[in-house]
Image (tube, rainbow, N blue to C red):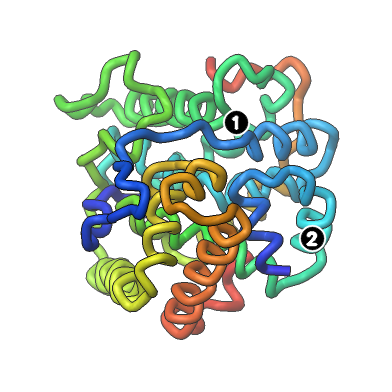
Amino acid sequence: MGIAQKPLELKPISFPSGKTASFAMDKPDIDSDLVRRAQDGDRHAFEMLVVKHQRRLANVISRYIKIAQEVEDVTQEAFIRAYKGLKSFRGDSSFSTWLHRIGENAAKNYLTAQKRKLPAHRLGEGEAEDDWQETSTAGANFEDPERLLHTKQIAQVVATAMAALPESERTALMLRELDGMDYETIAKMMGCPIGTVRSRIFRAREHISAALKPLLEPNRDRRW
Amino acid sequence: MNEKLSDYMDGDLLLAPQVIDTLRNNREAREAWTIFHLVGDVVRGLTTPDDGFSKRIFAALEKVQIEPDYDPLK
């Protein structure tokens, strides 16, 4: 679960403005808003954060723990710790950085309890920042063939659906999801109004979601 | 509604009250929130946990309360 693979490889992105997509922008802080709501007692807001961050957190933990079921257990433990200690989050770092540190500590504690050695390639303390998606190449061992197949199918369906998108929609979604740009920056890069960026990203998500649903349908009643 | 959800995911905080309320009460919207994030994670190279994972976490969280003096980093 939550295992890092190579990001999807798609055609190079070209822009009418001739600019290149070589920088990432800060995201508006939805997480802080949801944390504040959760701190005020809205458990549902925290559940939204769980859905959003589960794979990223599992990926951090999988740098330390290699058994998929154990990664799930420790990921769950980290979310429980985060929820119990939500009042201690004051926004000094991003929520994801804070959550990933909790996950790393939970993984180390788990390994200590199991009297195992930390993997030789474990990351240093300074690498608990919000850069997990670019730096991680480690992953848990998917010992379950059915699960591995399902994971590969999902990646394949997304890649195929992305490739079938109009270039403008694919570009907008990639700039948003891969480069982390906000709508205003994407609009400047693509030479179009912000409203057009908004529509392109939404249509791209809808298209890919429609392609994914049949694959996820058998487990529909198990999801949130 | 899914278009507003997509906008909110990308930072339109003004939509927060409406989106959060809809997610609380609308299963289709929750599904969209889940799949939209799955799409983003797959694009970034992260694979998916099994489909029941977040639900198990929610079940575990039902037994947990926020503790004002608890330090999750210790």
Please give the name of the residue rendered at 21% of the width and 41% of the height, measured from the top-left corner: A137
Please give the name of the residue rendered at 53% of the width and 71% of the height, measured from the top-left corner: A203
Mark identifier at residue B24? 2
The correct choice, above or below, for A116 with respect to B31 in the image is: above
Q: Where the C terminus of chain A falls, by quadrant?
A: bottom right
Of the residues tagged 2 and 1, which is closer to the observer? Answer: 2
Mark identifier at residue A32? none
The correct choice, above or below, for A29 with respect to B71 in the image is: below
Q: Amino acid at mark 2?
A: Arg
**Residue A147 visible, this orientation:** no
Q: How many marks?
A: 2
- Give coordinates of residue A100: x percent, y percent: 46, 30
User: Is B73 on the left or on the right of A150, as rendered?
Assistant: right
- Give coordinates of residue B39: x percent, y percent: 44, 62
Please give the name of the residue rendered at 80% of the width and 63% of the height, measured from the top-left corner: B22
> Disc 1 marks which residue?
A81
Q: Where the N terminus of chain A falls, by quadrant?
A: bottom left
